[in-house]
Image (cartoon, rainbow, N blue to C red):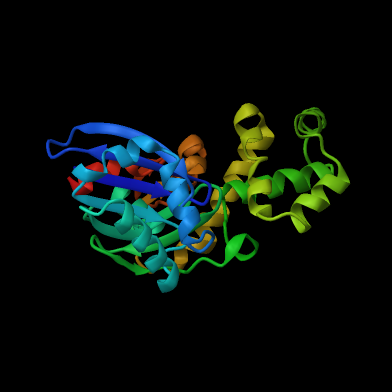
Amino acid sequence: MILIADAGATKTFWILVNDERMVVGKFHSGGLNPTVFDKVTLSKNIAQNAEILAHAPYIKEIYLYGSGVDDSVAYDRLNEVLADLFDNAKIHIYSDLLAAARATAGKEEGIVMITGTGSNSCYYDGQEIVKSIGYFGYILMDDASGNWFGKQLLRDYLFGIMPKQLRQQFKSEYKIKADKIIKNLYQKPQPNTYLASFAPFMSAHYKSGYIKDLLLKGFEKLVTEQLPAYKQYKDVPIHFNGSIAYHFKTELIEVLNKHQLKIGKIIKDPLEELIDFHV
C-alpha cells in the first residue's frame, strides 16, 4: 500500500491507497513542518492518529509533501521520524509546491500557483520545478492569498473604504478592537494566519459588489505582477491549487480570460489528484 500526505504546520492530511488504486482510508494528524518541530513532537503529531500507525506494517511507500522540507537539516529530521515509524516503507519527501504541480499539471509543463493562506508559484516542466521566485513570507509575497485579502479587508474597514453595511457586519463578526489588532499583528506568532482569518468574510458576503471588486483586484495583481516572472506564462497552462482560487474561481477565470491566458486545473487541495500521479 502507498501512503500519501499533505503536511502543514498545524495539520496533516493522509490518504492510504492499495495496489488496485482503491482508497483504504483517509486520516488527519498534527502538523509536520520540520523547521518548526523537533523529532519528538513530529513523532507525537503523527501518533495522534493511531489508525495510521496500525497500517504501518503494510505500507511500502510514503510520499509526503509539506512546507519546511527544503532545509536539509529539517528534511533529515522528518525523514528519520518517518523511517522509525514506518520501517517497511520507502520514504519520499517533497515540497508542497511540487505537490501542487504534480496534482494539477501531472506530467505536462505549466505554471503552478498556490493560493491558500499564503501564495507561491513555479514553472514546472512536467517532471520537476525548474524555476520558482522563492517564498519570502507574507510581507513581500502572498499576492491574492487568504492573508493578502484579509489585510485588504481590515485596511478597508479601518479607512472607511468598506461599504457602511459591510463595515457594521465586519465589526460585529470579528469584534474589531485596536488593541486586539496590534496584539495579533505585532506581538503574537503567525500574524499571516490572523490576517487570513478575515478571508471567509468574502464567502459570507460574496454577492456584494465590493467583494467582487476586491477579488478582481487581488487576482489582477497576481496575474500582472507575479506571472511575468516566468517567460513561458503566455504559452503554457496556468494551474491553481488552494482554497482562495477554488472558492473564487469565477473571478479568477475572468481575470485570466481578460489577459488571454491558458487556464489549467483549479483545485482546492492536491491529495486526491496525487493518487493518479503515484499509483
Q: Along the line of sight, which residue is nearer the eye, 196 or 256?
A: 196
- Residue name at image x 20 percent, y 52 percent: 88
Q: Is residue 138 left or right of residue 35?
A: right
Q: Please identify the quarter of the rendering in which residue 49 is found.
A: top left
Q: How many marks?
A: 0
The reply, left or right, for residue 201 in relation to residue 57 is: right
Asked if residue 235 can be seen in this view, the reply is no
Tell me what residue is drawn at x 51 percent, y 37 percent: 248
State the image quarter where residue 176 is shown: top right
Residue 174 location (% of width, % of height): 76, 34
Q: Which residue is situated farthest in the bottom direction here?
A: 72
Q: Looking at the picture, how far across and down is residue 24, in whole percent? A: 24, 32
**Residue at 59% from the left image edge and 31% from the top image edge:** 203
61 displayed left or right of 166: left
Q: Nearer the viewer, residue 211 or 182?
A: 182
In the image shown, does 95 or 231 lie closer to the viewer?
95
